[in-house]
């Protein structure tokens, strides 16, 4: 797992590949047939996946809705396949799976096709089962991922979705100013991931101080909430610590009753217009005795917090790629400190090929 965490700069470069030229339009092999007319006719996008891939979809939803202005839903494949999804020939469905063999995701894709929706598989393994079922396939090119807990596949999925989103926006002429900024940031993304990996010792120090905890909470707003859900899953998967991720605005609607002296709360703050609200939420938990770890690329210099990990600034749409890296390391160091098998956590398989 640690090896794959450190492979992320290279994996992201491979995913970007030649899709983002320094000048000229974005081109995505496999999606050349997506006409402007079809993209303008889409009534909604459905993103369907399981586990970590589904959390990558939550970040993608923010991009599609805010940049392309297309309504987007994210659904768990095992739920999608057993309901009557309201989709038709004007619905575009993405199905995300690292292995391309996830049983629930493949079954969900077949249902979408029966209802006439256009289907795109986002996969990492060339020639896998889902690529034979989907109308279109786009590969992440993350390279082999062996550890059960996904790291580089997740960040490459978000990277690829940002490229697809930019491509769609260019085709339909939406928010091209945002696309230009995002394109510039995307080309700098691998270097910023490398910079973030250099923060590992600060993460390790905090992890070693709290590895005996029984509960950890994650707080975020907007796209940071999606990152919190993935961070919480990573911690559960390999350290066996109970953790929950909450949209920070929901604190007062119940979860704050769980905050008591000494509890650990991890917060992500990368969305500029939400910083003030997030700071207020953090102050709420600090006043109740919580230990806090803050992952941010915003200026919190005037705030007296014990543990702030400052990550590089980047577009908020790409921030999940950066902000998750300290929290992948966080889960890893806690698991190692507990003496657990990081790469093969109990009861889990790399690819869930049965229900």
Image: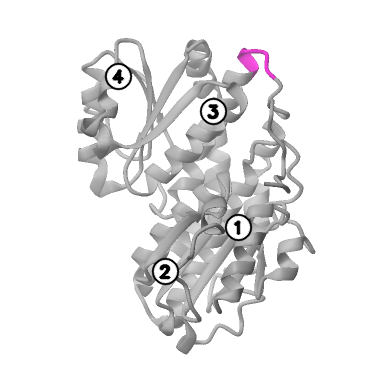
- Secondary structure under tag 2 reads helix
| Circle 1/circle 4 CB separation < 8 Å | no
Q: Earlier in the sequence, mark 2 or mark 4?
A: 2
Residue holding disc 2: 180
Residue holding disc 1: 96
Residue holding disc 4: 259
The answer to whether 288 appears left or right of 215 in the picture is left
Identify the magenta region: 336-340
**What is the C-alpha distance between the residues marked 2 and 4?**
42 Å
Look at 54% across and 28% down and name the residue there: 235
The N terminus lies in which quarter of the figure? top right
Looking at the picture, tell me which residue is in the foreground, 58 or 208.
58
Q: Categorize mark 1 by other alpha carbons within 10 Å: few (<14), some (14-19), many (20+).
A: many
Q: Quadrant of residue 261?
A: top left
Q: Earlier in the sequence, mark 2 or mark 3?
A: 2
- Secondary structure under tag 4 reads loop
Residue holding disc 3: 235
| Circle 2/circle 4 CB separation < 8 Å | no
Q: Earlier in the sequence, mark 3 or mark 4?
A: 3
- Kindly tell me whether residue 198 is visible in this rendering: no
């Amino acid at each position: 797992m640690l090896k794959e965490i450190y492979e992320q700069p290279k994996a992201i470069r491979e995913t970007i590949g030649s899709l983002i030229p320094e000048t000229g339009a974005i081109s995505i092999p496999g999606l050349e047939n997506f006409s402007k007319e079809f993209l303008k006719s889409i009534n909604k996008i459905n993103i369907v996946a399981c586990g970590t891939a589904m959390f990558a979809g939550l970040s993608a939803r923010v991009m599609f809705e805010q940049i392309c202005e297309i309504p987007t839903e994210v659904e768990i494949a095992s739920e999608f396949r057993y309901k009557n999804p309201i989709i038709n020939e004007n619905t575009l469905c993405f199905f995300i799976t690292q292995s391309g063999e996830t049983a629930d995701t493949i079954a969900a894709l077949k249902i979408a096709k029966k209802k006439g929706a256009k289907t795109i598989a986002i996969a990492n393994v060339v020639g896998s089962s889902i690529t034979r079922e989907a109308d279109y396939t786009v590969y992440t090119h993350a390279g082999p991922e062996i550890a059960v807990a996904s790291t580089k596949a997740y960040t490459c999925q978000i990277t690829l979705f940002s490229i697809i989103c930019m491509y769609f926006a260019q085709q339909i002429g939406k928010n091209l100013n945002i696309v230009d900024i995002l394109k510039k940031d995307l080309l700098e993304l691998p270097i910023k991931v490398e910079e973030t990996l250099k923060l590992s010792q600060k993460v390790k120090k905090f992890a070693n101080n709290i590895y005996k905890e029984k509960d950890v909470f994650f707080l975020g707003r907007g796209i940071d909430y999606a990152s919190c859900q993935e961070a919480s899953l990573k911690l559960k998967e390999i350290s066996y610590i109970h953790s929950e991720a909450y949209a920070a605005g929901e604190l007062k609607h119940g979860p704050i009753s769980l905050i008591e002296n000494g509890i650990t709360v991890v917060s992500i703050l990368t969305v500029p217009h939400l910083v003030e609200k997030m700071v207020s939420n953090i102050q709420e938990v600090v006043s109740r005795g919580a230990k806090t770890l803050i992952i941010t690329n915003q200026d919190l210099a005037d705030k007296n917090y014990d543990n702030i990990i400052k990550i590089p600034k980047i577009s908020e749409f790409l921030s999940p790629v950066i902000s998750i890296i300290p929290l992948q390391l966080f889960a890893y160091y806690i698991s190692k400190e507990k003496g657990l098998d990081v790469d093969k956590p109990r009861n889990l398989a790399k690819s869930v090929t049965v229900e």
